[in-house]
Image (spheres, rainbow, N blue to C red):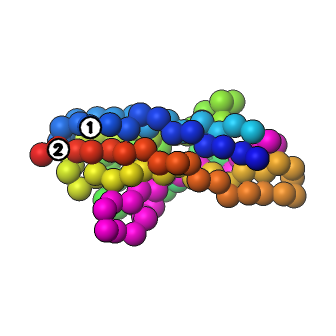
């Protein structure tokens, strides 16, 4: 089994910053793409950003230039630096990872979510 544990959420004023972390643990041979998704109240879950094992990144248009995704492969950890936060960034943020317990066996894993609230 593999677990993703997120941390770093909280309450921040508009214009402020937060840094989310997500650490993977368990039966891990390697980890492929990792990412962050978010779900606001009464809305569908949406992609925020992803990063491949080689470091290639992809961002939602709504966060480009404000959010930065990074990862530490040695620590099996992915980060999301969020700057210039807006009230519309308020959501539960979920970590996602494509994990491998062997070269031919993969499992997509989700974290439990961490709440980010941006006040105006």
> Along the line of sight, which residue is nearer the eye, 56 or 23?
23
Find disc 1 in the rendering and name its residue: 11
Q: Badge 1: how crowded within 10 Å, few (<14), some, or many (20+)? A: some
Find disc 2 in the rendering and name its residue: 119
Toward the top, the furthest residue is: 75
Residue 42's label in the rendered image is none
Direction from residue 60 to residue 99 in the image, left or right? right
Q: Can the viewer see residue 17 in this picture?
A: yes
What element does badge 1 sit on?
strand
What residue is shown at x 21% (from left), y 49% (from top)?
Answer: 86
Q: CA distance from mark 1 to mark 2?
A: 7 Å
Image x and y of residue 18, in percent: 33, 35
> Along the line of sight, which residue is nearer the eye, 72 or 28?
28
Direction from residue 110 to residue 101 in the image, left or right? right
Image x and y of residue 49, in percent: 46, 54
State the extent of the magenta-drawn residues as a range: 27-48
What residue is shown at x 75% (from left), y 39% (from top)?
Answer: 26
Q: Are marks 1 and 2 in contact (CB under 8 Å)?
A: yes
The reply to whether the magenta stretch includes residue 87 is no
> Along the line of sight, which residue is nearer the eye, 20 or 83?
20
Image x and y of residue 88, in percent: 23, 56
> Along the line of sight, which residue is nearer the eye, 101 or 73?
101
Q: Badge 2: how crowded within 10 Å, few (<14), some, or many (20+)? A: some
Direction from residue 55 to residue 19 in the image, left or right? left
In this view, 73 is above or below 66: above
Is tag 1's residue or tag 2's residue first in the polypeptide sequence?
A: 1
Q: Residue 81 falls in which quadrant of the image?
A: top left
What element does badge 2 sit on?
strand
């Amino acid at each position: 089994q593999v677990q993703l544990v997120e941390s770093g959420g909280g309450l921040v004023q508009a214009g402020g910053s937060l840094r989310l972390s997500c650490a993977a643990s368990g039966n891990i041979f390697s980890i492929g793409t990792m990412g962050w998704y978010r779900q606001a109240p009464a809305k569908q879950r949406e992609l925020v950003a992803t990063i491949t094992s080689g470091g290639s990144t992809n961002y939602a248009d709504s966060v480009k230039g404000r959010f930065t995704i990074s990862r530490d492969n040695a620590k099996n950890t992915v980060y999301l630096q969020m700057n210039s936060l807006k009230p519309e960034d308020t959501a539960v943020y979920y970590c996602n990872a494509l994990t491998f317990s062997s070269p031919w066996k993969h499992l997509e894993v989700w974290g439990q979510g961490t709440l980010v609230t941006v006040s105006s």
